[in-house]
Amino acid sequence: MYSTSILRKLGSGEYQVKLSETLTSIIKQINKAETEATIASIFENNLHYLIKSFFEKEIIFHKESGKNFFRHKFLGRVDAISNGLVIEYKSIDKLTSEKDQKNAISQTKDYLKQIHNESGSSYQGLVTNGKKIAYLYFIGDEIKNTAFSTIEVKDLDRIIQSLINVGSKQFSPKNIVSDFKSTSHITQNLSNSLYDAICTHKTQKTEMLMEEWQVLFRLSESDKGQNQDIEKRRKKLSEIFSDNIDNNEKEYQALYVLQTSYAIIVKLIACKVIQTLSFSEDVKFFSDLSIIDSIKLQRFMEKLEDGYVFSSGGIRNLLEGDFYSWYSDKNQWNQKIYNSIKNIIKELEFYSSSNFTYEFQTIDIFKDLYMEIMPNEIRHSLGEYFTPSWMADHVVSRSLEKLNKESWKAIDPCCGSGVFLISLIKSILDKHELYSLTIKEKQELLFRILSSVYGIDLNPLSVLTARVSYFLAIRPLIDDQKIEIPVYLGDSANIPQKIELDNIACYTYTVETKQGNFNIIFPCDFVESSSFFERMYRLQTTVEAEDPNLLYHQIIENIDKNSINKKIQESIKILSSKLVELHKNEWDGIWIRITSNFMLIARIKEMDLILGNPPWVKWEFLPQNYAEKIKSLCIDRKLFSGQSYMGAISLNLCALIANVTSDKWLTNKGLLAFLMPKTIMTQDSYAGFRNFYLSDDSRMYLSEIDDWSNAGNPFIVTTEKFMTYFYEKNHVDYSNGIPINLFYKKTNVKITEVNRFHTFEKVKDFFQIKDGMAYQLSENRTGFTLLPERDYTILRKLKLISGNSDYKARSGVEFTPAEVYFIEPEKRTSKNTFYFRNSEFKNSVYKNDSNYKFELETKYIKPVIKSPFIKPFEILKSNNYCIFPYENNSRQSTSLENLVKESELLANYLIINKNLIEKQSKRSLMISMGNDFYSLSKVGNYTFSPYKVVFRDNTNMCASVVIEQETPWGEKILPIPAKHAPYISMDKNGEEITEEEAYYLCGILNTDIINKYFKFTFSGRSYSINFEIKLPKFNRKNPIQYEIAKLAQELTVKKINYEEGISRIEELYLKLCDSI
């Protein structure tokens, strides 16, 4: 680590003179050198003298080092090694040809690889003959090297800084996680000191910041905490803080503290990287922070949180006084907080930031750190999943390849920790050797990146992480320029709208606060000006003057006179008063920055590429207020399917973000590349989204898909199947198909091992890639059929069977909760009743004692058909029964009054379980058939039809005719199909099917081509009952239909060979379809 005295010397003019003198000395002596050994001696002696005389440090060059030095297996001998720097010397004439240079690089690379593979250490390397020099360094697990160039003063500086950085750690994920994981004493002390402060003496400002943080994170004090994920989260938080966290207040405080702890560490890492702070006479370098007292550190942290430390260095928006700055307020600060932060600073002093100065580094240390500080139970409950670096790299490289443009602008509208942003930056920087660029070339490259790579996120912690990652990625290019990192806090599902106020174009947005919402309306010219952010930043001081009139005039003075009218003036007056009011109520400090961020999003336009991994949150799981807020957007954009029954108005937030961002930002030749759930391709609830209409009635079209369903669940914590969707504005005829690339992870490697790598190039051999196709087979349905191969024989058959059905499938009855309604008979009693016990369920929320037997009358007890028991032409025997409190042919449940008269024991059983029954979802209660609390949903006239064909709605399509079953009490009863066992009992005209008709349908539904249709057209977890296949009305006079029915009957009683019979049915069915 560098001490303050060394840092001062490194920044001095005297040091530059010494470097120049040393270089001259080396060159003069090298000219007379004849051997490699002489060159090594000249080089090392000069460096040793400068370091000892000027820095007063002793360094040792370990010569001819091999396995005895490294203490592990090692082939070869390193010329010299010192402080993690491997040096390979060559004689003067050995680096003249390209071949010599390649061999020298290859030799040194081999040494570095061996060290890395055996010890995990990522050493740096250099090759030199005293006149030419090349560097080798790690980016992740990959070794990069510079081209050979003539040795200069800057080379000596780089070597010396590496050599005197004795004992310094690298900013690697392994080191950072080891030092700052949640169980390390450093992080524990920080979290505990913050938790103690917030629990025992929370200030008004802290209260404000935390409440607004809750608004942003959609957390509510009215949350009943019934969700299992919340219970797991509370248990984990209780372990971390050694406290009984059993209510919302404690839970949210603990969450807030954990996120604050992570934020503090990230911010201090950013400080360490810039090294020179120039904060005050006492604090000029990062190392000075470890020796200042509590008052001075509090002032520094307060200014750090406010962004001063970085803005004074030219980076205007790296830190902006976010929700996690509460601890730095002088009224909240205490000795424990001081000690814990000082310990972090001391630990960071052991790290070297020199690797960020010279070359681009792929930074994913924050993702790993976040996952360590925020355990899985917490991340899962917040819906947080991290995209592996190699997958982000694949999406970026594929997107840029499809875009095929030299110059482009790209945005990740839900950027999270910034993994896609870093991959985009890498794609630009990979084409350049940074160390050899001139100052002007670096500046041009810097501004190309800043004008090409953008990010947005609604999570302030993500914005912080993404900005710092972005900053570290471009650090080698920064040289005192004033820059704004284009990563903004905002909601990509609800971006500012463009309106006109008396012929002046304006942007408008509503900001929500606990103290009431306020509207922002600014002229477009003002928002789009290059000085907008800086001008807004300066307003914070004016707000603190508590003079709304002064604030109003300062805003107006920054706006061009031609962009002002009375309506705009009035709006700005109201805004000024609201901001001052918030300040007076001690509800301030963040609104100017938040306002600026949300408005900056409005000026984003003309993006060539929109990419990323937006949140996969279903509509029904969104907080109610937020869901209502964006509901109109979904309706306006024709995103809902239009089917209100059975939840078909459901949607996923990622679909809305895809639509909004494409509509607002994408160029005509641009590309949208999102990771989204596979169900978007098939489920009925996404019918509206699949049409992908934009606001001008133009459309986006899916051009290609990468299917990761069999890639080994790269997100680890979720098994949701997903794809990379590539959308463009060019028309695509879906009936002709679109290509799918299917990725299959090989069995010889674990996905956790794959996720260690940063680029797809490094992991591609772990996958087998196959070609598939996606088609829209029906004009009446937007869902796709996904073929895992390019088999046109199957496709022709699928197109042949695609069409209209004359029958309507129905969902099985919903018995909710199943723990109450599903029972199993045990033995008869002497009173014409039966003993039953509750069925067992492995993943049941409600635990019943399955060994407990209870007595019930049998009138309303029916056999029940569950999906796993359905086989082709057969329903397996089982002990599955259900409580079905309905009279035959009645859609309304039997009243409680009648139930008490006819089945008193059953009535008592249901009353005892009333509280449990009433915990079912509002949707289930709404669509239940009957007025009594025990009424069930999905019951209709069709439920009581005498003939039915029942089939599975998941995993593997198969069907059987429903026949009467003899019960243990001697009755023959027609079983009731339950949820996941849909059935057909009527045609679309409401006529009940006949027995022959049931067998006819059963035969068709068991054919291989129908099985493939369901398998390739719907999610394996749930088949839609609104299928588009030809099921023409049965006519026993039609010889084809009649033969299908007869064959199905024979297969049911096993009179004929199954394979022969089902093949013949398929042959007949295809012939029937062809005749229509």
Image (spheres, rainbow, N blue to C red):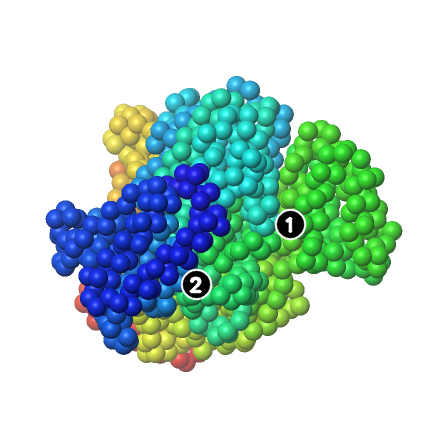
Can residue 442 be seen here? The reply is yes
- Foreground pick, 440 / 1037: 440
Across and down, in percent, residue 422 comes to 45, 57
Left/right of residue 748 with respect to residue 996 in the rendered view:
left
- Foreground pick, 193 / 713: 193
- The residue indicated by pointer 1 is 598
- The residue indicated by pointer 2 is 434
For the point 77% across and 42% down, which residue is it? 575
The crowd level at tag 2 (other Cα within 10 Å; few <14, some 14-19, many 20+) is: some
Q: Please state which of the two labelled residues, at mark 2 or mark 1, is closer to the viewer.
A: 2
The crowd level at tag 1 (other Cα within 10 Å; few <14, some 14-19, many 20+) is: many
- Foreground pick, 825 / 436: 436
Left/right of residue 723 with respect to residue 282 in the rendered view:
left
Across and down, in percent, residue 780 comes to 52, 69
For the point 35% across and 45% down, which residue is it? 53
Instruction: Give residue 636's quadrant in the image.
Output: bottom right
Mark-to-mark CA distance, 2 and 1:
34 Å
For the point 32% across and 45% down, which residue is it? 52
Across and down, in percent, residue 1062 comes to 26, 69
